[in-house]
Image (tube, rainbow, N blue to C red):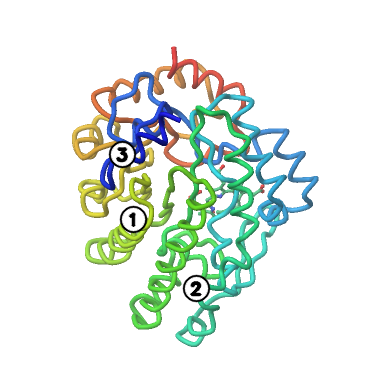
Amino acid sequence: MAESSMAATAGAKTPVRSDKTLLRALAGERVDPPPAWLMRQAGRYLPEYRATRAQAGDFLSLCYNPDLAAEVTLQPIRRFGFDAAILFADILLLPQALGADLWFVTGEGPRLSPLTDAAGVAALKPTGAIHETLNPIYETVRILRRELPEETTLIGFAGAPWTVATYMIAGRGTPDQGPAHALRTGDPAAFDALMAQLTEATIEYLSAQIEAGAEVVKIFDSWAGSLKDTAFQRYALEPARAITAALKARHPGIPVIGFPREAGQGYVGFARATGVDCVALDNSVSADWAAREVQTDGCVQGNLDPRHMVTGGPALTAEARRIVRAFAGGPHIFNLGHGITPDADPENVHRLLEAIRG
Ligand code: 1CP
């Protein structure tokens, strides 16, 4: 109640005040202990996830089944009591909604029909058609808003246009994003047309998630690190800026987390240049450096090496506490630097939360 009345009087620029720790950190407040969640917190390291995935049949059927997708989103909340839940879906559902064929090869990863030229871009469905495919995802969001504990924040997400384009162009994950770089330099008009449509479609997709009940959205640019200098500005910064501006114009106060993974020096000034409320950091940068160079602009998220969730022991506790201390001077959301891996030990998640929360 208090939350909605404050929202009504807060005005367009002021973030909604809330008792939710994650929203407070995103609004620029230093929260002690910091709110915590983990990328890929619903996943194969949890036996209950593997059971629900088997019930769904395969990964994509799980994504498009709102009851089961909501169930796997809730599993790590029940088991660990994280401060946030992230919608269970995948960044590659958007290309599928735009007409790409998509399937997952067990043990290898995603496959899509490759998009190699201007004709391929022109053959994509119009942006307005995406909701036909993505409606079940919005239903998952609605179920989650009903079922999540009051103190848990619901995060929606999408891939950033560059990262999504790398999969669409190659038709699969690649070590160096070579095919996408080749199209970017070889046929810039086709590449720019693809980026423009992905930017527009991402705005529509995230906006629909927000309308369904997502309280924060995160933009995953997993391959931002392979863009340098002007290419980074044009294809990582600029789309993040355009998406953030459009979402905030439509949904005043909606917090946005940007994750330009492995951007290195590109993390500096990223929040100012794009308008995101929080920059998520991978574990290749030091927390002390990021506290000085990035957190000075606002909230940061990160950045424990996911290997600690496999190896555990005193190093896990020491490293988690070191990160909490490094970021203790400003707003911080605790997370890993990348997703938790299938070989992680769920007991180590309990140990991690103990280390953070004391
Ligand atoms: O169960 C399984 O076998 C499938 C494994 C899996 C899972 C659990 C995939 C396949 N996607 C997901 C869920 C997922 N993907 C979420 C759900 C929410 C959560 O974090 O719990 C999110 C946010 C993603 C985002 C995603 N998908 C990214 C960006 C983040 C990152 O990891 O860098 C990327 C690049 C993908 C593509 C993708 N989907 C799945 C795989 C194996 C991959 C990566 C392929 C590659 O390595 O190139």
- Whether pointer 3 and pointer 1 mark residues with C-beta atoms closer than 8 Å, the reply is no
Quadrant in the rendering for residue 129: bottom right
Amino acid at circle 3: Thr
Asked if labels 1 and 2 touch by Cβ distance under 8 angstroms, the answer is no
- For the residues labelled 2 and 1, the Cα–Cα distance comes to 18 Å
Q: Residue 13: image x %, image y %?
A: 26, 46
Residue at figure coordinates x 45%, y 62% from the top left: 202
Tag shown at residue 350: none
User: How many numbered discs sit on the rendered protein?
Assistant: 3
Check the picture and name the quadrant holding the C terminus: top left
Q: Amino acid at mark 1?
A: Thr
Q: Residue at x 43, y 33 (%)?
A: 335
The structure residue drawn at horizontal position 56% and vertical position 68%, both measured from the top left corner, is 130
Where is mark 2, residue-wise? 127
The mark nearer the N terminus, 3 or 2, is 3
Q: Position of residue 52 (x, y in %)?
A: 75, 41
Choose the circle earlier in sequence order: 3 or 1. 3
Distance from the alpha carbon under mark 3 to that under mark 2: 34 Å
Choose top left, top right, bottom left or bottom right for residue 46.
top right
Residue 356 spot, x, y in % from top left = 43, 19
- Mark nearer the N terminus (2 vs 1): 2
Q: Residue furthest top?
A: 358
Q: Residues within 10 Å of mark 3 (few under 14, many from 20)?
A: few
Residue 244: which numbered mark, if any? 1
Q: Tell me if 283 is positioned left or right of 46 in this view.
A: left
Query: Between tags 3 and 1, which lies in front?
Result: 3
Q: Nearer the viewer, residue 60 or 14?
A: 14
Q: Amino acid at mark 2?
A: Thr
Mark 3 or 2: in front is 3
Q: Which mark is residue 9?
A: 3
